[in-house]
Amino acid sequence: MIGRTPSHLIVASIAALASMLAMVQCSKNNSTPTQPTTPTLTVSGVTISPGSINPGGSAQGTVTLSATTGATVTLTSSNTAVATVPGSVAVAAGQASATFTVTGVSAGSSTITAAASGSQGTATITVTPGAAQVLGLTLSASSVVGGNPVTGTLVISSPAPAGGMVVTLSSSDPVTVPANVTIPAGQTTAAFTVNTRAVGGNFNNVVINASAGSLNATATLTVTTAAPTVPIASFTVSGPSGANTCRVNSGGATLDCTFNGGASTASPGGTLNQWSWTYKVAGTKSQNTTVPTLSPTTDCGLLGSGPLPAGATSLQMTVTLAVRDTLGATSAVATNNNVSVIPLAGVCGF
């Protein structure tokens, strides 16, 4: 008969086993959790575009990082006499790159270094001598009535350097210009006003000088007296048959068209008070009016005698007008050689 284990031993064994299980569970609960791995931040690239610039020009640099955690990247130029960069550029969190400006100073090459977290990247910029600077000077007009201004424009062949380019100006009576004009940094032109005074005679080819260091440019301006202002004659001929067409009315004494000099102008301060008309076909008629319109008359002395040449349907008439104003000034003669006159059958042999 197999002997039985005493009950107190069984209870002790169960308690020991429970204690061991508790220790194992506690050990699991107290284990250290695994920490996430932080990516290593490095400068993965530096580029500069364009890779060659002129003194005073600029290029865009780009620095790229290996992670998007954000960082401040230190920038240096190996030769600041050739090219300069800002001291640093910030790459924003969530971004992997940022741009910065490289400015050319003088001819040569320089290595641009970007450094962050103990790593760095480089790129090279070349600064090449630009073409020799050229200065030009233009005027908005080559001739002006004294007392009126014109506009001068300075032009250089490549952008002005930092601080701008100061150009010294000079001229002589009756022309005055500013002592100097600055072409702003990065710009190639600058405008200025050229003033003149009223003159009693013509001043031909007055020289305007511009200089900046060894650069020089000139332009010339002619200053004239005010041209005399006189009346100006202007007119139209129209009738029921159309512009520049007159038909002989029934009876043969008048034409159905109207001469209208209403577009004529007087001298400044004056008023037109006389319109002097002439009209000629075979003969000539002359009439003065104190109003701008005239209804012309006709007879066989004006028209001549028919018949019309074979194939012709009208006669050619020349109309002229001169106007006079209350200041006693008379205009030049305005002329229209292309007025057609359609004769009336049975009048003057037509």
Image: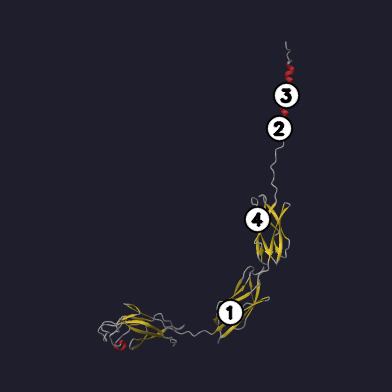
Residue extending farthest to the front is 310
Q: Earlier in the sequence, mark 3 or mark 4?
A: 3
Q: Which residue is mark 2?
A: 28
Residue 17: mark in rendering: 3
Residue extending farthest to the top is 1
Q: Residue at x 57, y 85 (%)?
A: 203
Q: Quadrant of residue 277?
A: bottom left
The answer to whether one can see residue 325 in this image is no
Residues packed near mark 3 inside 10 Å, few (<14), some (14 to 19) or many (20 plus): few
Residues packed near mark 2 inside 10 Å, few (<14), some (14 to 19) or many (20 plus): few
Q: Which residue is mark 1?
A: 195
As measured in the structure, the alpha-carbon distance from the residue carrying label 2 to the one carrying label 4 is 47 Å
Residue 126 percent location from the top left of the image: 69, 63
Q: Is residue 114 above or below residue 32?
A: below
Q: Earlier in the sequence, mark 2 or mark 4?
A: 2
| Pointer 2 with pointer 4, Cβ within 8 A | no
- Left or right of 78? Residue 328 is left
Q: Amino acid at mark 4?
A: Ala
As measured in the structure, the alpha-carbon distance from the residue carrying label 3 to the one carrying label 4 is 64 Å
Mark 1 or 2, which is nearer the eye? 2
| Pointer 1 with pointer 3, Cβ within 8 A | no
As measured in the structure, the alpha-carbon distance from the residue carrying label 1 to the one carrying label 3 is 113 Å
Q: Earlier in the sequence, mark 1 or mark 4?
A: 4
As measured in the structure, the alpha-carbon distance from the residue carrying label 1 to the one carrying label 4 is 51 Å
Quadrant into which the N terminus falls: top right
Residue 53 percent location from the top left of the image: 66, 65
